[in-house]
Image (cartoon, helix red, strand yellow):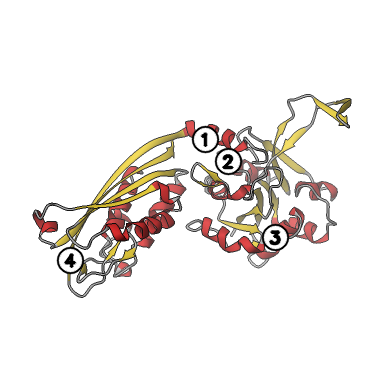
Amino acid sequence: MRVVALLMAAGRGERLGGAEPKQFLPLLGRPVLRHAAEALLRDGAVEAIQPICAEAERGRVDSILEGLPALPAVAGGATRQASVLAGLEALAGCAPEIVLVHDAARPVVPAGTVTALLRALERAEGAIPAQPVADTLKRVEDGTVLHTVPREALYRAQTPQGFRFPLLLALHRAAPEGATDDASLLEAAGRPVRLVPGSESNVKITHPGDLERVEADILPRLLPRVGTGFDVHRLVAGRPLFLCGVEVPHSMGLDGHSDADVGLHALCDAIYGALAEGDIGRHFPPSEMRWKDADSAAFLRHAAGRIAARGGMLANADVTLICERPKITPHAPAMIARVAELLGVPESRVSVKATTTERLGFPGREEGIAAQAAVSLLVPA
Protein backbone atom coordinates (compact mmCIF):
# COMPACT_ATOMS: atom_id res chain seq x y z
CA MET A 1 0.00 0.00 0.00
CA ARG A 2 1.25 3.47 -0.85
CA VAL A 3 -0.94 5.67 1.38
CA VAL A 4 -2.29 4.63 4.80
CA ALA A 5 -3.95 6.87 7.39
CA LEU A 6 -3.63 6.54 11.15
CA LEU A 7 -6.95 7.39 12.80
CA MET A 8 -6.25 8.55 16.35
CA ALA A 9 -9.13 7.49 18.60
CA ALA A 10 -7.47 6.76 21.95
CA GLY A 11 -8.25 10.08 23.64
CA ARG A 12 -10.83 10.47 26.39
CA GLY A 13 -11.98 14.03 25.56
CA GLU A 14 -12.17 15.37 29.12
CA ARG A 15 -12.70 18.95 27.95
CA LEU A 16 -15.97 18.01 26.27
CA GLY A 17 -17.30 16.28 29.37
CA GLY A 18 -19.86 13.49 29.35
CA ALA A 19 -19.58 9.75 29.76
CA GLU A 20 -18.60 9.01 26.15
CA PRO A 21 -15.30 9.92 24.48
CA LYS A 22 -16.01 12.46 21.75
CA GLN A 23 -15.05 10.13 18.90
CA PHE A 24 -18.01 7.90 19.78
CA LEU A 25 -20.64 10.62 20.07
CA PRO A 26 -23.45 10.54 17.47
CA LEU A 27 -23.22 13.03 14.62
CA LEU A 28 -26.20 12.98 12.24
CA GLY A 29 -26.98 9.48 13.49
CA ARG A 30 -23.50 7.96 13.22
CA PRO A 31 -20.39 8.08 15.44
CA VAL A 32 -17.95 10.95 14.88
CA LEU A 33 -15.28 8.28 14.36
CA ARG A 34 -17.14 6.84 11.37
CA HIS A 35 -17.51 10.28 9.79
CA ALA A 36 -13.78 10.92 10.22
CA ALA A 37 -12.85 7.60 8.59
CA GLU A 38 -15.18 8.15 5.63
CA ALA A 39 -13.87 11.69 5.21
CA LEU A 40 -10.28 10.39 4.94
CA LEU A 41 -11.32 7.95 2.23
CA ARG A 42 -13.43 10.35 0.19
CA ASP A 43 -10.67 11.65 -2.12
CA GLY A 44 -9.85 8.05 -3.10
CA ALA A 45 -6.12 8.26 -2.35
CA VAL A 46 -6.07 6.61 1.08
CA GLU A 47 -5.91 2.84 0.62
CA ALA A 48 -6.41 1.76 4.22
CA ILE A 49 -7.06 3.16 7.67
CA GLN A 50 -5.21 2.03 10.79
CA PRO A 51 -7.31 2.96 13.86
CA ILE A 52 -5.62 3.45 17.23
CA CYS A 53 -7.77 3.36 20.35
CA ALA A 54 -7.90 2.27 23.98
CA GLU A 55 -7.37 -1.46 24.45
CA ALA A 56 -10.89 -1.95 25.83
CA GLU A 57 -12.46 -0.26 22.80
CA ARG A 58 -10.77 -2.18 19.97
CA GLY A 59 -13.80 -4.35 19.25
CA ARG A 60 -16.09 -1.34 19.33
CA VAL A 61 -13.92 0.60 16.88
CA ASP A 62 -13.67 -2.36 14.51
CA SER A 63 -17.47 -2.62 14.55
CA ILE A 64 -17.96 1.10 13.84
CA LEU A 65 -15.58 0.92 10.86
CA GLU A 66 -17.05 -2.29 9.44
CA GLY A 67 -17.38 -2.15 5.68
CA LEU A 68 -14.51 0.33 5.25
CA PRO A 69 -10.91 -0.56 4.27
CA ALA A 70 -9.83 -0.45 7.91
CA LEU A 71 -7.12 -2.60 9.47
CA PRO A 72 -7.80 -4.15 12.90
CA ALA A 73 -7.60 -1.52 15.62
CA VAL A 74 -4.45 -1.42 17.72
CA ALA A 75 -4.13 -0.28 21.31
CA GLY A 76 -2.69 3.19 21.90
CA GLY A 77 -0.49 4.45 24.71
CA ALA A 78 -0.81 6.85 27.61
CA THR A 79 -0.15 9.89 25.39
CA ARG A 80 -0.99 10.85 21.83
CA GLN A 81 2.67 10.57 20.89
CA ALA A 82 2.82 7.01 22.26
CA SER A 83 -0.38 6.16 20.41
CA VAL A 84 0.99 7.42 17.09
CA LEU A 85 4.11 5.31 17.61
CA ALA A 86 1.94 2.25 18.28
CA GLY A 87 0.11 2.87 15.01
CA LEU A 88 3.33 3.35 13.07
CA GLU A 89 4.78 0.14 14.51
CA ALA A 90 1.65 -1.72 13.45
CA LEU A 91 2.28 -0.54 9.87
CA ALA A 92 5.99 -1.37 9.88
CA GLY A 93 5.34 -4.74 8.24
CA CYS A 94 3.62 -3.28 5.18
CA ALA A 95 5.76 -0.09 5.21
CA PRO A 96 3.61 2.31 3.19
CA GLU A 97 5.30 5.15 1.36
CA ILE A 98 3.06 7.84 2.89
CA VAL A 99 1.26 7.94 6.23
CA LEU A 100 -1.41 10.44 7.21
CA VAL A 101 -2.16 11.10 10.89
CA HIS A 102 -5.70 12.27 11.61
CA ASP A 103 -7.70 13.04 14.76
CA ALA A 104 -10.84 10.89 15.02
CA ALA A 105 -12.54 13.92 16.58
CA ARG A 106 -12.29 15.79 13.24
CA PRO A 107 -15.28 14.42 11.29
CA VAL A 108 -14.88 16.75 8.30
CA VAL A 109 -11.92 16.58 5.92
CA PRO A 110 -12.69 19.08 3.17
CA ALA A 111 -12.54 17.73 -0.38
CA GLY A 112 -9.09 18.15 -1.88
CA THR A 113 -7.21 18.25 1.43
CA VAL A 114 -5.71 14.76 1.10
CA THR A 115 -4.83 15.39 -2.55
CA ALA A 116 -3.12 18.67 -1.62
CA LEU A 117 -1.08 16.94 1.10
CA LEU A 118 0.11 14.24 -1.30
CA ARG A 119 1.15 16.83 -3.84
CA ALA A 120 3.07 18.73 -1.18
CA LEU A 121 4.83 15.51 -0.16
CA GLU A 122 6.29 15.24 -3.65
CA ARG A 123 8.56 18.16 -2.62
CA ALA A 124 8.84 17.68 1.15
CA GLU A 125 8.92 15.01 3.82
CA GLY A 126 6.03 16.48 5.80
CA ALA A 127 2.91 18.51 5.03
CA ILE A 128 0.06 19.85 7.15
CA PRO A 129 -3.16 21.79 6.55
CA ALA A 130 -3.18 25.08 8.43
CA GLN A 131 -5.03 28.37 8.61
CA PRO A 132 -3.64 31.81 9.43
CA VAL A 133 -4.66 33.14 12.83
CA ALA A 134 -7.32 35.81 12.32
CA ASP A 135 -8.07 36.84 15.90
CA THR A 136 -5.97 39.13 18.08
CA LEU A 137 -3.96 37.04 20.54
CA LYS A 138 -3.47 37.98 24.20
CA ARG A 139 -1.10 36.46 26.71
CA VAL A 140 -2.97 36.18 30.03
CA GLU A 141 -1.98 35.41 33.60
CA ASP A 142 -4.53 35.00 36.44
CA GLY A 143 -7.26 36.44 34.24
CA THR A 144 -5.31 39.59 33.44
CA VAL A 145 -3.92 40.48 30.02
CA LEU A 146 -0.15 40.76 30.06
CA HIS A 147 0.39 41.80 26.45
CA THR A 148 -0.73 41.26 22.86
CA VAL A 149 1.00 38.52 20.88
CA PRO A 150 1.78 39.46 17.27
CA ARG A 151 -0.27 37.18 15.01
CA GLU A 152 1.69 37.75 11.81
CA ALA A 153 3.02 34.46 10.39
CA LEU A 154 1.03 32.44 12.97
CA TYR A 155 -1.05 29.51 11.72
CA ARG A 156 -3.48 27.04 13.31
CA ALA A 157 -2.42 23.49 12.47
CA GLN A 158 -5.07 20.92 11.56
CA THR A 159 -5.13 17.25 10.58
CA PRO A 160 -4.71 15.05 8.61
CA GLN A 161 -0.98 15.64 8.56
CA GLY A 162 1.06 13.80 5.94
CA PHE A 163 4.58 12.35 6.15
CA ARG A 164 7.02 10.03 4.51
CA PHE A 165 6.46 6.86 6.52
CA PRO A 166 10.07 5.71 7.11
CA LEU A 167 11.09 9.15 8.39
CA LEU A 168 8.15 9.57 10.76
CA LEU A 169 8.65 6.08 12.19
CA ALA A 170 12.36 6.74 12.79
CA LEU A 171 11.70 10.11 14.43
CA HIS A 172 9.01 8.68 16.71
CA ARG A 173 11.25 5.81 17.77
CA ALA A 174 13.99 8.28 18.76
CA ALA A 175 11.89 11.13 20.16
CA PRO A 176 11.40 11.90 23.86
CA GLU A 177 7.84 12.46 25.06
CA GLY A 178 6.31 15.90 24.75
CA ALA A 179 5.55 16.50 21.07
CA THR A 180 2.17 18.20 20.58
CA ASP A 181 1.86 17.06 16.98
CA ASP A 182 3.83 14.96 14.54
CA ALA A 183 5.05 17.87 12.44
CA SER A 184 6.97 19.19 15.47
CA LEU A 185 9.20 16.10 15.32
CA LEU A 186 10.24 17.02 11.79
CA GLU A 187 10.74 20.64 12.83
CA ALA A 188 13.04 19.56 15.69
CA ALA A 189 15.03 17.41 13.25
CA GLY A 190 15.44 20.31 10.83
CA ARG A 191 13.21 18.76 8.15
CA PRO A 192 10.97 21.15 6.21
CA VAL A 193 7.19 20.87 6.62
CA ARG A 194 5.02 22.33 3.88
CA LEU A 195 1.66 24.03 4.50
CA VAL A 196 -1.49 23.41 2.46
CA PRO A 197 -4.68 25.44 2.92
CA GLY A 198 -6.76 24.47 5.93
CA SER A 199 -10.48 25.07 6.34
CA GLU A 200 -12.91 26.45 8.92
CA SER A 201 -15.05 23.36 8.37
CA ASN A 202 -12.24 21.09 9.62
CA VAL A 203 -13.46 21.38 13.21
CA LYS A 204 -12.00 19.31 16.04
CA ILE A 205 -14.79 18.31 18.42
CA THR A 206 -13.46 19.72 21.68
CA HIS A 207 -16.07 21.81 23.50
CA PRO A 208 -19.86 21.60 23.97
CA GLY A 209 -21.48 23.09 20.91
CA ASP A 210 -18.87 21.83 18.44
CA LEU A 211 -21.13 18.97 17.37
CA GLU A 212 -23.98 21.35 16.58
CA ARG A 213 -21.57 23.55 14.65
CA VAL A 214 -20.41 20.63 12.51
CA GLU A 215 -23.97 19.42 11.91
CA ALA A 216 -25.00 22.92 10.82
CA ASP A 217 -22.12 22.92 8.33
CA ILE A 218 -22.83 19.44 6.91
CA LEU A 219 -26.62 19.50 6.60
CA PRO A 220 -26.98 22.23 3.92
CA ARG A 221 -24.65 20.24 1.66
CA LEU A 222 -26.76 17.06 1.82
CA LEU A 223 -29.49 16.39 -0.71
CA PRO A 224 -32.45 14.16 0.29
CA ARG A 225 -32.92 11.11 -1.93
CA VAL A 226 -35.70 8.49 -1.73
CA GLY A 227 -35.67 4.92 -3.02
CA THR A 228 -38.18 2.07 -3.13
CA GLY A 229 -37.74 -1.66 -3.54
CA PHE A 230 -40.01 -4.66 -4.13
CA ASP A 231 -39.22 -8.37 -4.13
CA VAL A 232 -41.05 -11.71 -4.22
CA HIS A 233 -39.92 -15.27 -3.51
CA ARG A 234 -41.82 -18.56 -3.69
CA LEU A 235 -42.38 -20.64 -0.54
CA VAL A 236 -41.03 -24.20 -0.81
CA ALA A 237 -40.51 -27.13 1.53
CA GLY A 238 -37.07 -28.03 2.84
CA ARG A 239 -35.63 -24.51 3.10
CA PRO A 240 -35.09 -22.33 6.20
CA LEU A 241 -37.08 -19.09 6.25
CA PHE A 242 -35.04 -15.90 6.58
CA LEU A 243 -36.80 -12.56 6.83
CA CYS A 244 -34.98 -9.28 7.48
CA GLY A 245 -31.88 -11.11 8.65
CA VAL A 246 -33.67 -13.36 11.15
CA GLU A 247 -34.40 -17.08 10.81
CA VAL A 248 -38.12 -17.49 11.48
CA PRO A 249 -39.56 -20.91 12.46
CA HIS A 250 -41.94 -22.06 9.71
CA SER A 251 -42.89 -25.17 7.79
CA MET A 252 -41.51 -23.74 4.54
CA GLY A 253 -38.77 -21.40 3.39
CA LEU A 254 -38.21 -19.05 0.47
CA ASP A 255 -36.73 -20.33 -2.76
CA GLY A 256 -33.93 -18.38 -4.39
CA HIS A 257 -30.31 -18.38 -5.47
CA SER A 258 -29.17 -16.88 -2.15
CA ASP A 259 -30.96 -17.35 1.17
CA ALA A 260 -33.91 -15.55 -0.53
CA ASP A 261 -34.40 -13.05 2.29
CA VAL A 262 -37.13 -11.07 0.59
CA GLY A 263 -37.07 -8.24 3.14
CA LEU A 264 -33.35 -7.56 2.82
CA HIS A 265 -33.53 -7.85 -0.97
CA ALA A 266 -36.26 -5.22 -1.19
CA LEU A 267 -34.30 -2.98 1.17
CA CYS A 268 -31.12 -3.31 -0.90
CA ASP A 269 -33.05 -2.38 -4.04
CA ALA A 270 -34.45 0.68 -2.27
CA ILE A 271 -30.95 1.84 -1.32
CA TYR A 272 -29.46 1.18 -4.75
CA GLY A 273 -32.42 2.98 -6.29
CA ALA A 274 -31.97 6.05 -4.09
CA LEU A 275 -28.32 6.17 -5.16
CA ALA A 276 -29.24 5.53 -8.83
CA GLU A 277 -26.95 2.47 -8.79
CA GLY A 278 -29.22 -0.16 -10.32
CA ASP A 279 -30.60 -3.09 -8.37
CA ILE A 280 -29.39 -6.05 -6.33
CA GLY A 281 -29.02 -8.22 -9.43
CA ARG A 282 -26.52 -5.80 -10.89
CA HIS A 283 -24.28 -6.02 -7.83
CA PHE A 284 -24.86 -9.70 -7.02
CA PRO A 285 -25.84 -11.53 -10.25
CA PRO A 286 -27.77 -14.77 -9.61
CA SER A 287 -25.75 -16.33 -12.42
CA GLU A 288 -22.64 -16.30 -10.18
CA MET A 289 -22.31 -19.45 -8.09
CA ARG A 290 -20.47 -17.66 -5.29
CA TRP A 291 -23.83 -16.18 -4.24
CA LYS A 292 -25.49 -19.60 -4.05
CA ASP A 293 -27.24 -19.82 -0.64
CA ALA A 294 -25.38 -16.64 0.42
CA ASP A 295 -26.41 -14.79 3.56
CA SER A 296 -28.24 -11.68 2.35
CA ALA A 297 -26.65 -9.75 5.21
CA ALA A 298 -23.62 -9.41 2.91
CA PHE A 299 -25.82 -7.70 0.32
CA LEU A 300 -27.19 -5.17 2.80
CA ARG A 301 -23.71 -4.45 4.17
CA HIS A 302 -22.63 -3.70 0.61
CA ALA A 303 -25.59 -1.38 0.09
CA ALA A 304 -24.77 0.42 3.34
CA GLY A 305 -21.17 0.69 2.17
CA ARG A 306 -22.34 2.37 -1.02
CA ILE A 307 -24.10 5.04 1.06
CA ALA A 308 -20.88 5.61 2.99
CA ALA A 309 -18.78 5.68 -0.19
CA ARG A 310 -20.97 8.47 -1.51
CA GLY A 311 -20.51 10.41 1.74
CA GLY A 312 -24.18 10.00 2.62
CA MET A 313 -26.25 8.81 5.53
CA LEU A 314 -29.44 6.84 5.96
CA ALA A 315 -32.25 8.90 7.47
CA ASN A 316 -34.67 5.98 7.78
CA ALA A 317 -35.65 2.61 6.31
CA ASP A 318 -39.13 1.08 6.23
CA VAL A 319 -39.82 -2.55 5.26
CA THR A 320 -43.26 -4.13 4.85
CA LEU A 321 -43.50 -7.91 4.64
CA ILE A 322 -46.61 -9.19 2.82
CA CYS A 323 -47.75 -12.66 3.88
CA GLU A 324 -50.46 -14.63 5.67
CA ARG A 325 -48.04 -16.72 7.69
CA PRO A 326 -45.83 -16.72 9.67
CA LYS A 327 -46.91 -13.91 11.94
CA ILE A 328 -44.28 -11.20 11.79
CA THR A 329 -45.08 -9.10 14.88
CA PRO A 330 -43.40 -11.45 17.41
CA HIS A 331 -40.18 -11.34 15.37
CA ALA A 332 -40.24 -7.66 14.36
CA PRO A 333 -38.03 -6.38 17.23
CA ALA A 334 -35.28 -8.87 16.34
CA MET A 335 -35.61 -7.95 12.66
CA ILE A 336 -35.34 -4.25 13.42
CA ALA A 337 -32.26 -4.84 15.57
CA ARG A 338 -30.59 -6.93 12.86
CA VAL A 339 -31.32 -4.49 10.03
CA ALA A 340 -30.09 -1.56 12.15
CA GLU A 341 -26.90 -3.47 12.95
CA LEU A 342 -26.23 -4.22 9.28
CA LEU A 343 -26.89 -0.62 8.26
CA GLY A 344 -24.89 0.82 11.15
CA VAL A 345 -27.72 3.08 12.35
CA PRO A 346 -29.82 3.34 15.54
CA GLU A 347 -32.86 1.08 15.71
CA SER A 348 -35.03 4.19 15.84
CA ARG A 349 -34.28 4.70 12.13
CA VAL A 350 -35.58 1.28 11.07
CA SER A 351 -39.16 0.05 10.73
CA VAL A 352 -40.24 -3.53 9.97
CA LYS A 353 -43.93 -4.28 9.77
CA ALA A 354 -46.28 -6.70 8.00
CA THR A 355 -49.60 -6.87 6.24
CA THR A 356 -51.72 -9.49 4.50
CA THR A 357 -53.63 -9.46 1.21
CA GLU A 358 -56.85 -10.65 2.87
CA ARG A 359 -56.29 -14.13 1.37
CA LEU A 360 -56.09 -12.69 -2.15
CA GLY A 361 -53.37 -13.53 -4.69
CA PHE A 362 -50.25 -15.63 -4.20
CA PRO A 363 -49.49 -14.26 -0.70
CA GLY A 364 -53.08 -15.02 0.32
CA ARG A 365 -52.73 -18.57 -1.00
CA GLU A 366 -49.42 -18.84 0.92
CA GLU A 367 -47.50 -19.58 -2.27
CA GLY A 368 -44.90 -16.92 -1.57
CA ILE A 369 -43.91 -13.84 0.42
CA ALA A 370 -43.47 -10.33 -0.94
CA ALA A 371 -41.75 -7.32 0.55
CA GLN A 372 -41.63 -3.65 -0.25
CA ALA A 373 -39.17 -1.16 1.19
CA ALA A 374 -38.61 2.57 1.19
CA VAL A 375 -35.55 4.50 2.32
CA SER A 376 -34.62 8.15 2.63
CA LEU A 377 -30.97 9.13 2.33
CA LEU A 378 -29.00 12.34 2.70
CA VAL A 379 -26.24 12.47 0.11
CA PRO A 380 -23.83 15.27 -0.81
CA ALA A 381 -25.19 17.19 -3.78
Going by the numbered disc 1, the residue's amino acid type is Ile
First of labels 4, 2 by sequence position: 2
Going by the numbered disc 4, the residue's amino acid type is Leu
The residue carrying pointer 4 sits among few (fewer than 14), some (14 to 19) or many (20 or more) residues within 10 Å by Cα, namely many
Mark 1 and mark 2: span between their CA atoms? Answer: 9 Å
Residue 265 lies left or right of residue 110; in this view the side is left
Question: SS of the residue at dot 2?
Answer: loop
First of labels 2, 3 by sequence position: 3
Instruction: Write down the residue under mark 1.
Output: 218
Q: Are marks 1 and 2 in contact (CB under 8 Å)?
A: yes
Going by the numbered disc 3, the residue's amino acid type is Gly
Does residue 65 appear anywhere in the picture?
A: no
The residue carrying pointer 1 sits among few (fewer than 14), some (14 to 19) or many (20 or more) residues within 10 Å by Cα, namely some
First of labels 3, 4 by sequence position: 3
Question: SS of the residue at dot 4?
Answer: strand
Instruction: Write down the residue under mark 4.
Output: 235
What is the number of the mark on residue 108? Answer: 2
Residue 99, horizontal then vertical, whole percent: 66, 54
Mark 3 and mark 4: span between their CA atoms? Answer: 51 Å
Mark 4 and mark 2: span between their CA atoms? Answer: 47 Å
The residue carrying pointer 2 sits among few (fewer than 14), some (14 to 19) or many (20 or more) residues within 10 Å by Cα, namely many
